[in-house]
Amino acid sequence: MQISGRHKTDDIVWFTLFHELGHLLKGHSKKAIFINEGEAHQGDEAEADDFARDVLIPPSESHNLDRLRTDRDVVEFADFIGVSPGVVVGRLQHDETWPRNRGNKLKRKVDFATR
């Protein structure tokens, strides 16, 4: 498994990691090739997306996402469920609960620099 530094924020890195782990744990084909051309994920890709979504923010807590109004709300919720605030912001943005330009200061930059 390989993860790039694409987008370089903690929400994308953690989602991508758990998405790829979802493929492994769900026994998806190792030979399948997927090219994302902007359409909604289906089949194995949708299942891996769902796995990552539910690992990062458990379904038992996801109903609380609609109640998050401020950055402070996000930080407190993230602390409560044990994830980075950036992960919560990424989910809020993905679900279109928050616009893409809101909460970005809570996302952490990730650097995969090699030395």
Image (cartoon, grey):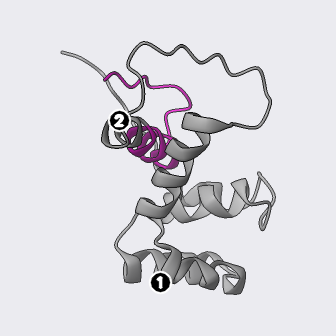
Q: Secondary structure at mark 2?
A: loop
Q: Is residue 100 above or below residue 63?
A: above
Q: Is residue 78 above or below residue 107?
A: below
- Residue positioned 58% across, 83% down in the render: 73
Is disc 1 surrounded by few (<14), some (14 to 19) or many (20+) residues within 10 Å?
few
Amino acid type indicated by mark 2: Gly
Instruction: Out of 37 and 13, give the one closest to the viewer.
Output: 37
Horizontally, residue 62 falls left or right of residue 108, namely right
Q: CA distance from mark 2 to mark 1?
A: 35 Å
Residue of label 1: 76
Of the numbered discs in the image, which one, if any, rests on residue 27? 2
Q: Secondary structure at mark 1?
A: helix
User: Where residue 61 sits in the image (x, y, percent)?
Assistant: 51, 82
* Marks 2 and 1, the one that precedes in the sequence: 2
Q: Which residues, given as a range, are shown in magenta?
A: 1-19
Q: Is residue 79 above or below residue 105?
A: below
| Quarter containing the N terminus | top left
Instruction: Out of 43 and 12, give the one closest to the viewer.
Output: 43
